[in-house]
Image: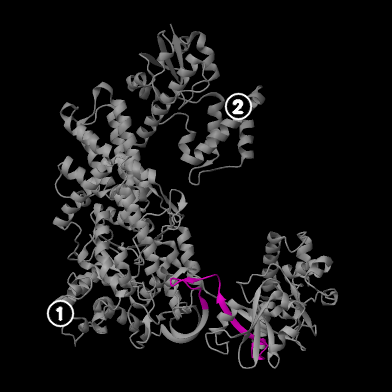
């Protein structure tokens, strides 16, 4: 196997954030080291084992992988990868959780015998306070962190061929050449263009802020509005005199320009802070400061990228202003107060269309109905009371005043009914757009969907409106400033182009995604993703080859780099920085060379690289590609992972397209969000120090497998320490005592059951690993196997263990747990079991076909023992609650107690008739039944239904039918059989000694309920048999005292 380490710096603005993290980390480690009140002996034992095992692996280069001589068949190689995190602090358990999914998968495939190629991309590790100032130089991050990253990953037990490690950015000339080739190739295909577009932008950084440059707001896109220019009518109030000589507009942002015909007024927030901003030499917009900043970056400010505020205002200053608004049928409308306006959404100025907007309708209703409210804000009646609703759109079901109609239907009382208004808005806006017809204006008679863009275009062309864009939600850059939307002239990758999108959809359709939610996430992203800005002005990275004033944006240079791992060691000679002497020089890596290696291009005739080395690199790529699995957090679906699909389909041949993505959720710590600010946080290094690597891995596997957020529980990690060390002690004790064990093949019932449980564990655990369900693999390969071993110990009694079976258990459990706890498993394998080689390469254990009937018989036995113990306690003590587990209950009486266990191995009477009916009405393929009415009719026509006491019997039949239906739906048609698939009496008699020991009685007999003489032995307790008659699967025990 080779586990590749890729590190990339995105750290131009991360020093302060890291300082906080580092301070916490060192504080925690100091506190832990000084804790003298707790014994760490068990944990330290595991840590000692880990150090020893890691030394073995390193000495023998266990994880070094080379391609085979011929191309691999399906299943013969495994190539997985994991996206690199930002190097701005220690790698934490969130990173480790995603990473663990790939690590466990790779370890499983290695165990199966596949040739493995897994690369991970890590890391960031702590620094001292004295060092922090040096990190103002971004290249310091690249020289400092990677070696520390290697230490942490090795401590975690990550199997890695470190020869293939590499640093990205232009500090590594080999990787820099690779990215330049990739960008030139995309441009030559017409997939990179220069364009002027709206882009999320960091004013502080002075460049676009892509997803991974953001501290918050990842995935947020620009939201485009139409700003309606509502002109202030002269004469201006005194406060506005400074604006005379200019055209002054209240700038209202709307998503529905087609409704402007219905304007009756404008809304402002009374306590909102506004400003009068110079848009150009002659026009002034009154709007929120945040909106003015966005406009300044969209060529709508007299001073580019700097709002020019002539007058500070509040919403109260705007109330009552007379306005002339485009398309409104009213000559003059007024600005009125609305208390629900959000100043961080739109411009803070809102148009009022009460015919079609429920919020506007109710706000206007409140103003008219509440004189005190009008008086509070100095509103004159003539501004409000004459307002009439203007019908503008006809909507089926809602008429031409849809807001009024819906508000009356929903009985909305005021503008404070926020939940109802939100639902009303949802209904009216959707219906208005999809089904509405314009009934006024130039486009009367046309559908709203058709008229909307036409009306918007006319408003823009006539200068009555402008285009305005802002982030859909708040976006904070990693520099700490709030981002805006800027109109920028830069390079874009043309994601979303129709033909390219079809290829991406084809690739996705053939990929394994392991979750419907993940597939839906990719389908949704492919639906909306459009041109993506691929250039930025500064930072670390590769320069755009044809326009070197720009660098390649951080999500655009990391889409096909997985291919680079296949050849990195040939190029860089094991030096992750690419600075050592190598047989190949960076300048020799022409586009023709890269095309030959990765795209099956013609042999580069002009190259002076040796043909044998070129062919070796091409051979490596052809062997390992495509990658089989990429593991990532689900938040990367909306960018990086989808970009990877697009770029592979553009550059690579179809047989090299990605095969699988497995996405997971975030991880919580002890059921709470992981957060540095609250202290609920652990780095990987801290976790290893606190719990050991294997206990950390154990708890990560147990944390969860789906796309929902998982939960790393400290108690689980601590319990793992105890379990693993106790298991080592059990191995040592039993290996020392093996000479006293029975020998030969499994001979007793307990032997056969234990051997069968081992076979089941192998089969189910292999399936769980194959499906990348590691929590389930831990359950079936460790917890369930432990339970089976414990039951075997109890069942063996004085006969003791079978030595061969114990060795089989030790071998199997060690192998099955190796992907999750490799150090522990390796120690068991080599030190205790004295096996040759390494467990990580030992192969999966083989298994016979599990005997499911034997498993059912054993469950029946165990359940019966629990029931017997419960009945014994109840009969002897009169207790209503039985003792399911715990000590034998014979101490409750000094008299001798005899147990009589009655078994009825076949349903008879009305139960048999009910089962016969259900069998006929059951579809075995779909596990469904005919309608209940059919079943009831069949019951009425049966011999049971024709009997004179049917009404009484029916009361018993109905719950029995329901129970058996549910059971058949759950486990299949066997639930409807008249007998169990094994002999109950035989199972109980064969395990009579176990039963006696488990319930604490010396005298127990197994009897048939069908035998009259046996029934007679119940004596005065016969009523108990009548009250609780035995049935298949449910024996009845009574206890006689003497």
Question: What residue is shown with label 1?
Answer: 611
Q: Residue at 39% x, 77% y: name it.
A: 553
Q: In the rendered view, tell whether residue 643 sits above or below residue 971.
A: below
Judge whether residue 469 is colored magenta. yes
Q: Residue at x 22, y 51 (%)?
A: 840
Along the viewing direction, whichever of 81 and 744 lies nearer the viewer: 81
Q: Magenta span covers which residues?
A: 459-484
Observer-nearest of 875 and 300: 300
**In the rendered image of this protein, does residue 878 appear above or below residue 350?**
above
Q: Determine which of the numbered discs, if any, sits on residue 983 in the image.
A: none
| Number of callouts | 2
Tell me where residue 984 sits by quadrant.
top left
Q: Which of the two discs, 1 and 2, labels the residue nearer the N terminus?
A: 1
Q: Which mark is residue 956?
A: 2
In the rendered image, residue 584, in percent from the top left (x then y), is placed at: 17, 79
Work out which quarter of the rendered image holds the C terminus and state it: top left
């Amino acid at each position: 196997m080779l586990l590749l380490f890729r590190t990339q710096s995105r750290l131009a603005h991360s020093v302060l954030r890291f300082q906080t993290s580092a301070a916490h980390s060192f504080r925690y480690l100091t506190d832990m080291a000084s804790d003298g009140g707790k014994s760490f002996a068990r944990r330290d034992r595991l840590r000692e084992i880990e150090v020893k095992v890691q030394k073995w692996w390193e000495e023998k280069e266990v994880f070094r992988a080379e391609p085979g001589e011929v191309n691999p068949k399906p299943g013969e190689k495994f190539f997985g990868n994991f996206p690199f995190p930002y190097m701005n602090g220690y790698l934490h358990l969130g990173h480790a959780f995603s990473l663990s999914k790939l690590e466990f998968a790779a370890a499983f495939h290695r165990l199966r015998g596949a040739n493995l190629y897994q690369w991970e991309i890590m890391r960031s590790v702590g620094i001292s306070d004295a060092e922090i100032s040096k990190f103002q130089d971004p290249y310091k991050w690249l020289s400092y962190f990677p070696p520390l990253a290697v230490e942490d990953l090795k401590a975690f037990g990550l199997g890695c061929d470190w020869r293939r490690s590499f640093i990205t950015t232009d500090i590594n000339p080999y990787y820099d050449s690779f990215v330049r080739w990739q960008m030139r190739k995309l441009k030559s295909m017409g997939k990179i263009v220069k364009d002027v577009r709206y882009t999320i932008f960091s004013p502080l950084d002075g460049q676009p802020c892509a997803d991974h440059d953001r501290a918050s707001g990842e995935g947020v896109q620009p939201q485009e509005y139409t700003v309606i220019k509502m002109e202030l009518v002269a004469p201006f109030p005194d406060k506005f005199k400074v604006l005379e000589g200019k055209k002054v507009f209240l700038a209202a942002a709307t998503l529905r320009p087609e409704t402007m015909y219905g304007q009756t007024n404008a809304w402002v927030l009374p306590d909102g802070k506004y400003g009068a901003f110079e848009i150009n030499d002659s026009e002034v917009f009154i709007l929120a400061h945040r909106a003015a900043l966005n406009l300044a970056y969209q060529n709508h400010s007299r001073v580019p990228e700097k709002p020019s505020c002539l007058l500070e205002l509040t919403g109260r200053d705007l109330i009552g202003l007379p306005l002339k608004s485009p398309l409104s049928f009213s000559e003059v409308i007024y600005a009125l107060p609305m208390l629900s306006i959000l100043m961080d959404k739109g411009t803070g100025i809102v148009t009022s269309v009460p015919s079609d907007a429920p919020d506007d309708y109710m706000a206007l209703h409140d103003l008219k109905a509440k004189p005190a409210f009008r008086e509070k804000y100095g509103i004159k009646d003539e501004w409000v009371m004459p307002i009439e609703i203007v019908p503008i759109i006809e909507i089926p079901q809602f008429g031409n005043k849809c807001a009024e109609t819906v508000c009356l239907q929903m009985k909305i009382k005021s503008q404070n009914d926020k939940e109802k208004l939100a639902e009303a808005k949802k209904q009216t806006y959707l219906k208005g757009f999809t089904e509405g017809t314009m009934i006024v204006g130039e486009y009367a008679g046309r559908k709203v969907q058709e008229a909307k863009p036409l009306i918007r275009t006319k408003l823009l062309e006539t200068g009555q409106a402008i285009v305005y864009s802002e982030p859909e939600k708040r976006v904070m850059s990693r520099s700490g400033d709030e981002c805006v939307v800027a109109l920028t002239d830069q390079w874009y990758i043309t994601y979303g182009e129709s033909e390219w999108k079809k290829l991406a959809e084809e690739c996705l359709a053939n990929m394994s995604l392991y979750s419907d939610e993940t597939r839906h996430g990719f389908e949704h992203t492919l639906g909306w993703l459009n041109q993506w800005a691929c250039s930025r002005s500064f930072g670390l990275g590769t320069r755009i080859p044809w326009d070197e004033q720009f660098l390649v944006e951080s999500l655009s240079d990391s889409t096909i780099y997985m291919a680079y791992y296949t050849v990195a060691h040939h190029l860089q000679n094991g030096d992750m920085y690419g600075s050592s002497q190598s047989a190949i020089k960076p300048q020799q890596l022409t586009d023709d060379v890269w095309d030959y290696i990765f795209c099956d291009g013609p042999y580069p005739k002009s190259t002076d690289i040796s043909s044998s080395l070129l062919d070796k690199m091409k051979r490596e790529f052809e062997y390992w590609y495509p990658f089989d699995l990429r593991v990532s957090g689900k938040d990367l679906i909306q960018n990086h992972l989808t970009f990877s699909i697009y770029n592979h389909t553009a550059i690579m041949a179809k047989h090299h397209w990605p095969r699988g993505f497995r996405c997971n959720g975030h991880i919580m710590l002890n059921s709470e969000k992981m957060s540095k600010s609250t202290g609920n946080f652990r780095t990987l290094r801290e976790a290893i120090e606190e719990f050991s690597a294997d206990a950390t891995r154990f708890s990560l596997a147990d944390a969860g497998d789906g796309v929902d957020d998982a939960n790393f529980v400290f108690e689980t990690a601590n319990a793992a320490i105890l379990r693993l060390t106790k298991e080592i002690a059990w191995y040592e004790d039993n290996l020392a005592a093996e000479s006293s064990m029975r020998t030969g093949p499994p001979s007793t019932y307990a032997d056969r059951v234990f051997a069968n449980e081992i076979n089941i564990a192998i089969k189910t655990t292999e399936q769980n690993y194959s499906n990348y369900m590691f929590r389930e693999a831990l359950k079936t390969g460790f917890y369930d196997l432990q339970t089976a071993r414990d039951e075997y110990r109890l069942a063996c009694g004085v006969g003791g263990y079978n030595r061969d079976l114990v060795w089989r258990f030790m071998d199997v459990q060690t192998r099955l747990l190796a992907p999750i706890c490799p150090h522990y498993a390796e120690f068991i394998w080599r030190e205790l079991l004295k096996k040759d080689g390494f467990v990580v390469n030992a192969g999966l254990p083989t298994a016979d076909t599990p005997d499911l009937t034997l498993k059912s018989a054993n469950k029946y036995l165990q359940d019966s023992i629990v029931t017997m113990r419960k009945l014994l306690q109840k009969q002897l003590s009169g207790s209503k609650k039985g003792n399911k587990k715990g000590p034998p209950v014979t101490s409750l009486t000094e008299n001798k107690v005899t147990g009589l266990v009655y078994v009825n191995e076949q349903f008879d009477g009305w139960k048999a008739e009910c089962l016969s009916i259900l069998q006929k009405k059951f579809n075995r393929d779909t596990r469904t039944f005919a309608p209940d009415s059919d079943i009831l009719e069949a019951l009425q026509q049966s011999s049971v239904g024709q009997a004179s006491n049917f009404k009484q019997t029916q009361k018993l039949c109905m719950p029995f039918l329901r129970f058996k239906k549910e059971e058949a739906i759950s486990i299949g048609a066997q639930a409807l059989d008249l007998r169990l698939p094994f002999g109950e009496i035989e199972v109980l008699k064969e395990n009579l000694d176990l039963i006696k020991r488990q319930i604490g009685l010396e005298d127990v007999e197994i009897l048939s309920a069908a035998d009259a003489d046996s029934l007679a032995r119940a004596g005065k307790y016969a009523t108990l048999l009548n009250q609780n008659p035995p049935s298949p699967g449910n024996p009845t025990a009574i206890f006689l005292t003497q």
